[in-house]
Amino acid sequence: MRLPNDFEFYIKQAIIRKQSPDRSRAQFLISESETSFQGLRKRVEVMGINKFNANSIIKDAYDIIMELIRAKLLLEGYSAAGNYAHEAEISYLKKLGFPENKLRFLNQLRYFRNSINYYGKILDEQYAKQVFEFLNQNHKKIKATLRIT
């Protein structure tokens, strides 16, 4: 799977738009992401990862990461909308120097999450475990890359 285009491509396509920074919405997303992260960790600790919750874990992990990226975009005065908005948001990490292998994983996660939401795809617990491990290993790194504390 290819990496997203450069962030500037999405600006030129008007998928990313310049706006006034929205600190209150950004703070909400940061808080929501942290609450969801702690809740997901607790849920996995209690229930584990299995075929009954694999899709849910994948979607929740994706949302946690995307809330952080959206928060940073809002703090910088950007918003994304329309087709390819999620891809554009992931490309922002590329602009900030996030490692290519992790961008590739996130882009794949975006694709699979969309497969769940829009096409009824059922993913297995092994992939859910990979996603959860990725989230645990990279949550702080993503926040650091975005300079969110």
Image (cartoon, grey):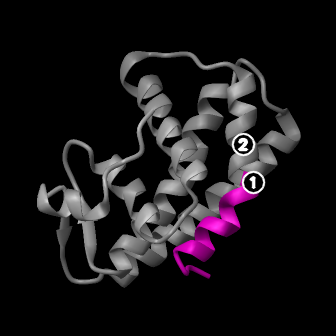
In the depicted structure, whether residue 54 falls above or below residue 58: above
Disc 1 marks which amino acid? Asn
Residue 136 circle label: 1
- Tell me the magenta residue range: 136-149
Q: Viewed as shown, does residue 18 lie left or right of 37? A: left
Measured as percent of width and height from the top left, residue 58 is found at 60, 36
Q: Looking at the rendering, in which quadrant would you find the C terminus?
A: bottom right
Closer to us: 102 or 68: 102
Measured as percent of width and height from the top left, residue 120 is found at 44, 16
Do the residues bearing badges 2 and 1 touch, measured as CB atoms within 8 Å? yes
* Prevailing secondary structure class for the magenta stretch in the rendered image: helix
Instruction: Count up the numbered dots.
Output: 2
Closer to us: 105 or 100: 100
Please tell me how crowded label 2 is: few (under 14), some (14-19), or many (20+) other residues with Cα within 10 Å. Answer: many
Q: Residue at x 60, y 32 (%)?
A: 56
Q: Looking at the rendering, in which quadrant would you find the N terminus?
A: top left
Measured as percent of width and height from the top left, residue 12 is found at 13, 61
Q: Which residue is drawn at 57% across and 73% down?
A: 145
Which residue matches tag 2?
A: 132
**CA–CA distance between discs 2 and 1?**
6 Å
